[in-house]
Image: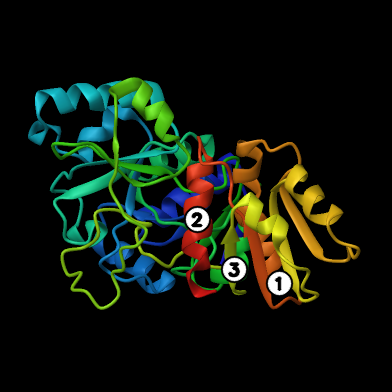
Amino acid sequence: MNYLPVSPDSLTQAAQILRNGGLVAFPTETVYGLGADAYNSAAIAKVFEVKERPRFDPLIIHISNVKTLEETADLSLLREDTRRKLFLLAENLWPGPLSLVLPKNKKIPEIATAGLETAAIRFPAHKAAQTLISLSGGAVAAPSANPFGSLSPTRAEHVRDKLGGKIDMILDGGQSQIGVESTVLDITGKSIKILRHGGTPKEEIEKLIGGVEDGFSKDQDFNGQNLSSGLASPGQLKSHYSPQKPLSVFSIEEIISLPFETDAAYLFFDGSARDAWLSARERNSALIRTLSEKGLVLEASARLFETLHELEKCQISRIFAQLAPFAGLGAAINDRLTRASIKS
């Protein structure tokens, strides 16, 4: 396995690996992705094998230019009003952390889309990702570069620690800027639905195209159901994004009232909640982490998985985490924390 910093030479090497059917972990502005040639069924099968990912969970197809969108999507199947909304979203929110569910081009193998006639397509904002995709053939199928269900990687080291011996190359581009996966928006139906909250807040989408629905209930559980037709989007399983230590989530009022446990870690959204918790206790020797001292949601989002990766390595029995405010990126933070808490 090659582990190299992002450079013109390493990007060229990585693109060659992809063209030859290999797997490359690469940085994006959201999290690190595990890439395969989006037109190569055998390479995509390796992604599922390496991640131990169920075949009913589709991958996101990454492109490097809006002009190549029709190489991955069949826009002729969209209604005229939907096409207008698509172009409005693409013009204003691409490149960026937004994946759009569209009718797929027949060149995209069914294994990439879990047998569905739609594909989630994204144009990432990270320059190294754009270059890699462009050099490798124009489209890369890439979920997060981690074992299925575990914490998403926001540093190359996270990928190395979990998947390093199973893939061909890891490109190190530093820490991810946003730190949670892309928002997935389905625009193919009569109503437009968010299938996964992520790096593009719902509010930004609604400013452009009007109201959108939440297309997935957190109470929905796919365990034991027939999923031969696939999920409509990645990130929809009830239990996901889980650290190796049990995690429980609480509102600000609830976490402030929690008693002190010597073998637990406490993860606060901001400094004010942490200070309120500390002021109510005589002992302050707890293992404490704060996502954003000033309550800045982008900073908190960028540090979420990074902090959970750190805490799961600590000698603790469990993690108590504070929910973020629900506006903006807070919805994505809370989605990840809630899904991670299922095993608690």
Which mark is nearer the camera, 2 or 1? 2
Mark 2 residue type? Arg
Q: Relative to 211, say whether 173 is above or below.
A: below
Looking at the image, can residue 132 be seen?
yes
- Using a 10 Å C-alpha cutoff, classify the residue at mark 3 as few (fewer than 14 neighbours), some (14 to 19) or many (20 or more): many
Residue 83 drawn at (x, y percent): 17, 26
Q: Is label 2 in a helix, a strand or a loop?
A: helix
Residue tagged by mark 1?
313
Foreground of the two, 343 or 298: 343
- Marks 2 & 1, CB-CB < 8 Å contact: no
Residue tagged by mark 3?
247
Q: Residue at x 74, y 36 (%)?
A: 294
Q: Quadrant of residue 260?
A: bottom right
Residue tagged by mark 2?
336
- Using a 10 Å C-alpha cutoff, classify the residue at mark 2 as few (fewer than 14 neighbours), some (14 to 19) or many (20 or more): many
Residue 342 drawn at (x, y percent): 48, 70
| C-alpha distance separating marks 2 and 1 | 19 Å
Question: Relative to residue 77, is residue 57 drawn left or right?
Answer: right
Foreground of the two, 310 or 154: 310
Q: Residue at x 43, y 52 (%)?
A: 16
Foreground of the two, 240 or 16: 240
Mark 3 residue type? Leu
- Marks 3 & 2, CB-CB < 8 Å contact: no
* Label 3 or label 2, whichever comes before in sequence order: 3
Question: Relative to residue 180, is residue 114 drawn left or right?
Answer: left
Q: Which mark is residue 182?
A: none
Looking at the image, can residue 29 be seen?
no
Q: Relative to 284, say whether 332 is above or below.
A: above
Q: Quadrant of residue 1?
A: bottom right
Residue 259 drawn at (x, y percent): 75, 68
| C-alpha distance separating marks 3 and 1 | 13 Å
